[in-house]
Amino acid sequence: MPTSPVLTAFPAYTRLNTLAASLRDASVERMLNTDASRTGEFSTSAAGLHLDYSKQLLDREALQALLQLAAEAELPAAVTRLISGEEVNNTEQRPALHTLLRANAGPGLEDKLGEVKAARASMRAWADRLNSGEHRGFSGAVITDVVNIGIGGSDLGPRLVTDALRPFHGDVACHYVANVDPADMQDTLLDLNPETTLFIICSKSFRTEETLTNSLLAREWMRTAGAADTDLDKHFLAITSNLKAADDFGISADNCLPMWDWVGGRYSVWSAIGLSCAIAVGWEQFQAFLDGAAAMDQHFAQAPIAQNMPMILSLLEVWHVNFLGIDNHVVLPYDNSLQRLPDFLQQLTMESNGKRVGQDGRSLAYSTGPVLWGSAGTMGQHSFHQLLHQGTQLCPADFIIPLTTYTGMKEQHRRLVANGLAQSRTMMVGRSENDARISLLARGMDEARASELAPHLVMPGNRPNSVITLQALTPAALGALLALYEHRTYCSGVLWGINSFDQWGVELGKEIGGQILGVMSGDATETVMDPATESLIARWRAAQ
Ligand SMILES: O=P(O)(O)OC[C@H]1O[C@H](O)[C@H](O)[C@@H](O)[C@@H]1O
């Protein structure tokens, strides 16, 4: 395997360390208030999104050093490697061509692009057939509900996109079942009618335990309702690269749409894995979603580092993790439709960059992907924002704020935006002890009590955050936003010298899961577990 460059070897690394130390006591508020051009310079726009990072704990010198780091790590060349189909996933010897899934041209990749276009045509045909009522179930009834069965990348992306684009929904309702907990499938089926339901089994591998278990439940439900095996094609589609397994399940090749090993699960919503979304919003809107992502791809490939939004976000991530010693990142969409965005980004970033060795397998002596978390504003304000403002850990935040609402309720939406902007500003300005004391006195509190209470009201401020705004949460803006975070993730992986496209860390748990299931089912009496696991299995057995 090639020797991967490591972050600490770049000349800019040492300089950034020094600059980070010198900035520890700097005031972001002062930097903003004394520099009229800071907001303009610490911001960039792309594909309908605007990023303002002027409230980051960063001055011009540090920003220049970060840009220098990106140049030393040759990020622009890394973008070319990604988009041109080089084997950026070195441990699995594959390219990662999610950009091709939304492209209209792919120089040197014509064969693959041809397959992508054929898959798009097939998605479109299925979306049209279902939305027009042409495709019918075994009793001749029109399909009214689609259930996507998948997990991880075969669930989180489609679920988020369908949820986020609610105002664009047509007549077919899309549901999502992922968990192997039978309650997930049972609850979903409660309101559904087998005659009018179609399942999409989404699994690149068609080997995933949860998905296969739920698919068997769905097939049984269909059979119990009177569907013959020859009717199954009216109720099941498969999105997979494993046609043989789909066929063994009873889904014919005509009902299978492709997935390819050169697309990672968490990067696959743009492929036929997104079919449920295309059905939910119709092909035109799904195409707009692809086009929005393609516009971000173009920006990523062409914009200079200093204006390159994904690169800037990635440099900020590395700045936080490796120079300010921060190990988490909170994403706060001020839009109810984006409440599933943190879930999606958790898989995207943590499965991609939660790695401890470089591409060459050598242990890394520095931190990589941070823990990502978050929830839709304003809910978090009434729960965890306390820690954002006064906790001992720094939690750099991305506020994501659409500037308009589809609801038509402008005044209420103004409140939502005001809340987002207020949280961003509050994280920066904080409150001194003296200001706290004065505000308590103004409320009529006596001097002694105000002095006693004031330390509890102190907020250090200077807490880094960025604000991403968009005109409206349209399919195109959503596509651009997801592509933005995909590319940010890739750039951070390049800066850390890791492979962002494999996920070996999830395998052992699956293997041990199989062993434990064997013991619980009594099929593997010879298997010896550790005493703690044995004792927990005994507790389970006693409860049966
Ligand atoms: O699409 P599938 O093959 O069913 O895979 C579903 C998911 O399961 C795996 O365990 C991986 O960790 C994910 O990256 C993947 O998205």
Image (spheres, rainbow, N blue to C red):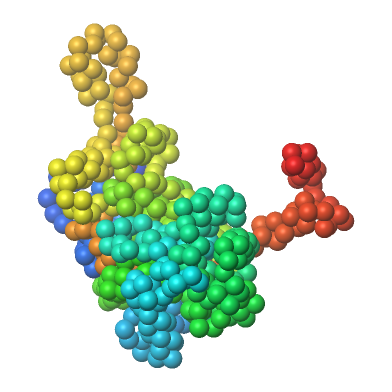
Q: Residue at x 27, y 40 (%)?
A: 423
Spot occupied by residue 4 in the image (x, y as percentages of width and height):
52, 72
Q: Which residue lies at the image location 40% right of the left edge and 69% below the top edge?
A: 142
Instruction: Name the spot of residue 154 as percent of width and height, x first.
Output: 49, 65
The percent position of residue 446, horizontal first and vertical second, equals 24, 8
Q: Residue 479: x and y, percent?
A: 31, 67
Residue nearer the viewer, 158 or 147: 147
Quarter that holds the C terminus: top right
Looking at the image, residue 86 sits to the left or right of residue 530; the answer is left
Quadrant for residue 512, please give it: bottom right
Q: Nearer the viewer, residue 142 or 11?
A: 142
Nearer to us in this view, 514 or 300 = 514
In this view, the residue farthest toward the right is 526
> Can you say which quadrant of the picture contains the N terminus?
bottom right
Residue 411 visible (yes or no): yes
173 or 480, which lies in front? 173
Q: Say above or below: 58 vs 251.
A: above
Q: Count the marks: how many?
A: 0
Residue in the picture at 41% in, 86% down: 118
Task: Residue at 28%, 70% (x, y): give it.
Answer: 285
